[in-house]
């Protein structure tokens, strides 16, 4: 008789995990192709159009880099907290709060201050706003052991509703034809772009932060504390680490980075605050961090991949009339496939004859 069992791996290498992640993406592409065929769309033609229009045209690369900017920041934000086994599912809400703070500065001081003053102030306030929004679940986690997945997730909807209050109310553009949008920002409140392209310098923020966070985690005392506590909270406690304080610091820094993503999106691309300003960048950041296993190089690679999914989804909506729900479904399939293959990263499949 044959028995199929799973044997715990003593160690799973980075390359093994990466291989399973790439396999999960391939499986998701296959399933996505089947779904496209079901709705009478040729999957080979659709995937071919994505490759041609995204990677072989200048406007495709521009759109790709614009999408990479917030995705890279939310991916870094989630990955930082995850290094300590803290799951910040609230990057979406922190992004909205950061965008709200930056918008307040742009609307009130955009015509009276220079870009050299406005941009740094908006960056700081957006990060402070994101950090304060993360402070609430951080305290609940640190002192009352309230599950941060629940609190950060629920606070997303509060943040989105708060933004809706302002764009439907006091900040609504009287010349906006009754649409829930604010007035367009002054030029001084917009991020500089590269030449004549719409690609803004916000794409560099995430890359700089990846380098900084990697250095902090690998070369500083607080990085050692994060690693120890993330691997074994009891070991961190016995080592004299103030775990409560560390939880609050990490979640607030994670929220600050996600808040910066909101500032980048609203000042670099949208140039005004509007409803649904995020395309789910905060939630996608969770997928990116999970796929990358919080590794900096992995975050860059998977951010590029997920940005391609976003841009390719927009192209399929335009070229084939597919709904946005298809794109959300594809993202869900990627995460589902990753979770499904996760067991093979942690365990070896053993077939025994008894």
Image: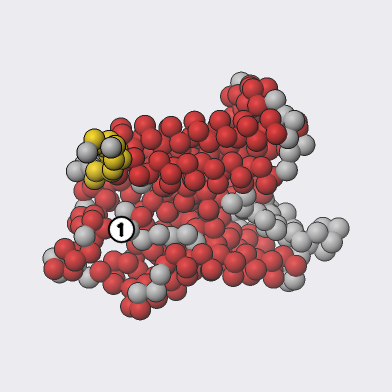
Where is residue 248 drawn, in percent x and y?
35, 69
Q: Is residue 324 left or right of residue 204?
A: right
Look at the numbered disc 1 and give the secondary structure of its residue: loop
Where is residue 293 drawn, in percent x and y?
36, 44
Q: Is residue 215 above or below residue 91?
A: above
Q: Is residue 347 visible?
A: no
Residue visible at 84% across and 61% down in the picture? 178
Q: Is residue 9 left or right of residue 45?
A: left
Where is residue 51 drawn, in percent x and y?
60, 24
Q: Quadrant of the C terminus?
A: top left
Q: Is residue 325 visible?
A: yes
Residue visible at 58% across and 60% down in the picture? 96
Q: Nearer the viewer, residue 151 or 202?
A: 151
The residue that disc 1 covers is: 84
Where is residue 330 drawn, in percent x and y?
59, 41
* Residue found farthest to the right: 177
* Residue found farthest to the front: 1
Residue visible at 31% across and 34% down in the picture? 16
Q: Is residue 264 left or right of residue 275?
A: left
Residue visible at 65% across and 26% down in the picture? 43
């Amino acid at each position: 008789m044959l028995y199929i069992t799973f044997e715990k791996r003593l160690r799973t290498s980075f390359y093994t995990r990466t291989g399973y992640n790439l396999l999960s993406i391939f499986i998701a592409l296959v399933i996505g192709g089947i779904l496209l065929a079901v709705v009478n769309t040729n999957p080979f033609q659709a995937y071919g159009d994505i490759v041609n229009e995204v990677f072989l045209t200048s406007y495709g690369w521009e759109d790709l880099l614009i999408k990479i900017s917030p995705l890279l920041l939310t991916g870094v934000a989630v990955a930082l907290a995850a290094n300590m086994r803290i799951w910040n599912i609230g990057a979406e809400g922190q992004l909205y709060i950061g965008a709200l703070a930056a918008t307040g500065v742009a609307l009130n001081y955009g015509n009276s201050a220079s870009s050299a003053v406005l941009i740094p102030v908006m960056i700081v306030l957006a990060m402070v706003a994101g950090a304060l929004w993360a402070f609430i679940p951080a305290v609940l986690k640190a002192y009352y052991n309230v599950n941060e997945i629940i609190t950060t997730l629920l606070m997303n909807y509060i943040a989105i509703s708060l933004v809706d209050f302002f764009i439907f109310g006091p900040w609504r553009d009287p010349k906006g034809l009754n649409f829930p949008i604010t007035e367009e920002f002054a030029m001084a409140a917009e991020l500089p772009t590269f030449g004549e392209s719409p690609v803004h310098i916000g794409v560099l923020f995430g890359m700089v932060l990846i380098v900084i966070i990697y250095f902090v985690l690998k070369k500083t005392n607080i990085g050692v504390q994060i690693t120890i506590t993330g691997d074994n909270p009891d070991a961190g406690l016995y080592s004299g680490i103030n775990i409560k304080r560390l939880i609050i610091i990490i979640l607030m820094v994670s929220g600050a980075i996600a808040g910066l993503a909101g500032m980048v999106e609203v000042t670099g691309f949208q140039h005004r605050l509007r409803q649904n300003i995020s395309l789910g960048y905060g939630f996608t950041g969770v997928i990116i961090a999970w796929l990358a296993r919080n590794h900096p190089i992995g975050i860059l690679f998977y951010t590029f991949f997920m940005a391609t999914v976003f841009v390719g989804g927009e192209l399929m909506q335009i070229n084939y009339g597919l709904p946005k729900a298809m794109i959300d479904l594809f993202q869900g399939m990627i995460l589902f496939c990753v979770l499904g293959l996760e067991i093979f990263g942690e365990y070896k499949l053993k077939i025994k004859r008894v």
